[in-house]
Amino acid sequence: MEELTSCKIAVENCLRDRTFSVAHLYKEEKAMDMHIHDCYELYYSISGGKQFLIDNRFYSIAPGDLFIINQYESHKLTQIDDMVHERIVFSIHPDYAKKLSSSETNLDYCFANRSESFQHKISLNKEQQKRFLYYVNKITSADGFAHDIIEQAAFMELLVMINSLASITQPDVKQLPESLSTYKYNHQVDDILAYINRNISNDITIEQLAGEFFLSESYICRIFKSATGTTIGKYITARRISIAKSLLNEGVSVSEAFERSGFTDYSNFFKAFTKAVGVSPKKYAGLTIS
């Protein structure tokens, strides 16, 4: 399998072929705002990353960290070190992960299982990092006779490894010590994110947020942008699109998804959803049913 050098192309290939693709990135592409893919994502950090925002959680990034992101979770790299930003990103079609599963082994588990205590990050030890890179090399170097079988077999072994780690590393949120909450970056912004996500289906304005937290509108906008790398409005829109996608995938009507996701103007909902997802809400609903 060709090792790509663009996340955008990797996602496009994944969705076109309905399988998976891999990109090895050595430089920062144009910074993306909060975004959502129609495919699963495995993000493996080699160097240069600093902070990830996934939905309403901040995560620090260190070499060897692996992030597991599904098709409903909005995400953005909010801080990047000056050093070379090197990472490996897998784009995986959800149907392909399900297809590779068996009645006894669910290779889709790490993407579909989202309990309250779920952590998107797994910090791989040195041996696990070697295994991960071994599978990547086997996938990207397969050539000649039966290369497709070798690629698929190595990819399945990689998913087995990640699912095994995910099933044993998820903490109980009630027992998680505060000191281990590594995604905390800024207490004020963390509280703002929590408030937004609790009230995402309601109308949320900057004036309202400023009053809720006893801050000026300019200050709350400034600290939010500084911490997350995006504006409050763009973050809220991305989260609402994530919710709408999830609802449509469950078979909810477009009108109900519009109302339950917190949008108040259907025209804005239609434009924002179509821009982010690439198809209209109605067409997306039809694709999930088929």
Image: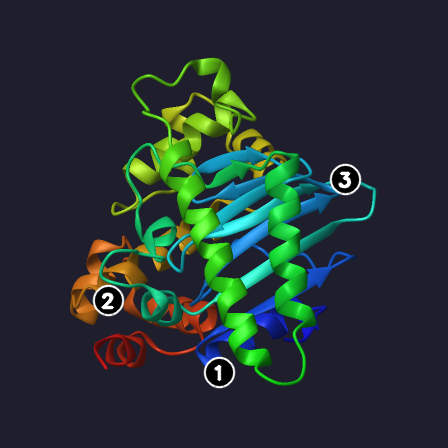
Other-residue count near label 3 (Cα within 10 Å), few / some / many at <14 / 14–19 / ≥20: few
Please say whether residue 172 is visible from this viewpoint: yes
What distance separates the C-alpha of mark 3 from that of mark 2?
37 Å
Mark 1 against mark 2, which lies toward the viewer?
Answer: 1
Using the image, tell me which numbered label, if any, was put on residue 248. Answer: 2
Asked if labels 2 and 3 touch by Cβ distance under 8 angstroms, the answer is no
- Vertical position of residue 14 compared to residue 242: above or below: below
| Residue 54: percent from left, percent from top | 48, 44
Dividing the picture into quadrants, the one containing residue 287 is bottom left
| Residue 50: percent from left, percent from top | 68, 37
What distance separates the C-alpha of mark 1 from that of mark 3?
33 Å
The residue indicated by pointer 3 is 81
Q: Nearer the viewer, residue 277 or 155?
A: 155
Mark 1 against mark 3, which lies toward the viewer?
Answer: 1
Dividing the picture into quadrants, the one containing residue 22 is bottom right
Q: Quadrant of the N terminus?
A: bottom right
Give the mark, 3 or 2, whose residue is nearer the N terminus.
Answer: 3
What distance separates the C-alpha of mark 1 from that of mark 2?
21 Å
Q: What's under tag 2, amino acid-wise? A: Leu
Q: What's under tag 3, amino acid-wise? A: Asp
Dividing the picture into quadrants, the one containing residue 7 is bottom right
The residue indicated by pointer 1 is 16
